[in-house]
């Protein structure tokens, strides 16, 4: 694995202050999401790594503000962040090294600013004020407003000039699958925090109440509801299968690893059944490590 200094140089980042800014962003990702960070460092082409690390750090920053504190605190925090981001994107100026790095990445890669604006607007509406979904249509609106642009502000940096229409549509399918798996894996924790991420219409179809889920009732109706949601997630994963061909070659090993981990996590939810209502379903440590090792071996064979 190239050193971080070599990686920055490979991306053409030579200014000492910018190198420090990108290092700050990468360290933030490492602390918050070590598995994605390691996947980038081990598997992605070095010239892409700094851009994507800055993008992931930015996405995480927005998520953290949108999900922390009272509704008023979230709204204020996102309003302040939007103003800071606007200034940074206009002239690169910011007291925040993370925003300086991200603004530089957006400018260098020519990612259309409307993706960033759309993500921030979605954070302030769809995410900060999230109250659950009544229907599948509301879930799709949530994806369009927040989850899809949230993925593109990160993954879109792989493309010089941003994703084209076909690539963007591919990431829309990918985020549909990823969000379904994430909601199922985090059911227990979300319910404990007052969030229900299964559409109310689905509960009604299976004669399941919110109280049934909050109390982790292991009934035939609850089991069938969860099984049906897992089937929908599997269908969405199958629909996103073409994303690998739409990714830049230097990022494909990372995308393949992300997809493999999603499939692993969904299978764990399926095995847990109603147990997913009592405890979140994580990756653990062994599965990501095995996946990274296999992917690293495959990458070496391809590049040898």
Image (cartoon, rainbow, N blue to C red):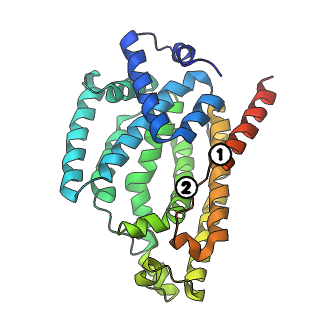
Is 47 on the left-hand or right-hand side of 133?
A: right
Q: Which residue is mark 1?
A: 288
Out of 88 and 57, give the one closest to the viewer: 57
Q: Is residue 208 above or below residue 130?
A: below
Residue 178's disc is: 2
Q: Residue at x 30, y 28 (%)?
A: 89
Q: In this orientation, does residue 161 appear?
A: no
Question: Could you tell me which secondary element the residue under label 1 belongs to?
Answer: helix
187 is higher (above) or lower (below) than 248: below
The answer, for residue 217, to whether it is visible in the render is: yes
User: x, y (%) of residue 27?
Assistant: 45, 29
Residue at (44% x, 74% y) in the render: 199
Name the residue located 51 percent from the left edge and 72 percent from the top edge. 277
Question: Position of 83 compared to 297: left or right?
Answer: left
Where is 12 relative to 135, above or below? above
**Which residue sits at x=65%, y=45%?**
288
Measured in 3D between alpha carbons, the distance from the residue under mark 1 to the one under mark 2, in whole angstroms, is: 16 Å
The quarter of the picture where residue 268 lies is bottom right
Does the CB distance between marks 1 and 2 fall below 8 Å? no
Q: Residues within 10 Å of mark 1 (few under 14, many from 20)?
A: many
Horizontal and vertical percent for residue 46?
Answer: 60, 22
Percent from the top left, x then y, of residue 119? 36, 46
Q: Nearer the viewer, residue 20 or 204?
A: 20
- Mark 1 vs mark 2: give the one in front: 1
Which of the image's four quarters has the C terminus? top right
Residue 200, given in percent of the width and then of the height, sits at: 42, 78
Quarter of the figure with the N terminus: top right
N-terminal of the pair, mark 1 or mark 2, is: 2
Q: Relative to residue 126, is residue 280 drawn left or right?
A: right
Report the side of 258 relative to 142 (left or right).
Answer: right
Mark 2 burial class by Cα count in 10 Å: few <14, some 14-19, many 20+ = many
Mark 2 residue element: helix
């Amino acid at each position: 694995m190239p050193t971080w200094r070599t990686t920055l140089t490979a991306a053409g980042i030579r200014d000492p202050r910018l190198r420090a800014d990108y290092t700050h962003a990468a360290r933030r990702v490492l602390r918050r999401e070590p598995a994605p960070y390691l996947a980038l460092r081990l598997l992605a082409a070095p010239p892409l790594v700094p851009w994507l690390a800055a993008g992931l750090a930015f996405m995480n920053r927005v998520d953290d503000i949108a999900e922390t504190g009272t509704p008023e605190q979230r709204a204020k925090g996102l309003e302040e962040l939007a103003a800071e981001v606007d200034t940074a994107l206009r002239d690169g100026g910011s007291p925040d090294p993370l925003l300086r790095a991200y603004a530089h990445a957006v400018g260098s890669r020519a990612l259309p600013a409307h993706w960033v604006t759309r993500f921030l607007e979605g954070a302030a509406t769809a995410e900060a004020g999230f109250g659950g979904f009544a229907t599948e249509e509301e879930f799709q609106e949530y994806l369009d407003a927040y989850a899809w642009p949230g993925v593109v502000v990160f993954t879109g940096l792989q493309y010089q000039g941003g994703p084209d229409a076909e690539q963007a549509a591919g990431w829309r399918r990918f985020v549909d699958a990823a969000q379904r798996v994430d909601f199922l894996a985090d059911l227990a924790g979300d319910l404990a925090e007052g969030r229900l991420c299964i559409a109310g219409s689905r509960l009604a179809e299976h004669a399941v109440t919110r109280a049934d889920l909050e109390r982790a009732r292991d009934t035939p109706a609850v089991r069938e509801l969860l099984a049906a949601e897992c089937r929908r997630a599997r269908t969405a994963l199958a629909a996103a299968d073409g994303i690998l061909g739409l990714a830049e070659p230097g990022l494909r090993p990372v995308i393949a690893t992300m997809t493999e981990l999603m499939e692993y996590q969904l299978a764990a939810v399926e095995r847990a059944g109603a147990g997913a209502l009592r405890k979140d379903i994580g990756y653990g440590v062994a599965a990501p490590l095995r996946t990274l090792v296999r992917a690293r071996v495959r990458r070496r064979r391809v590049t040898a």
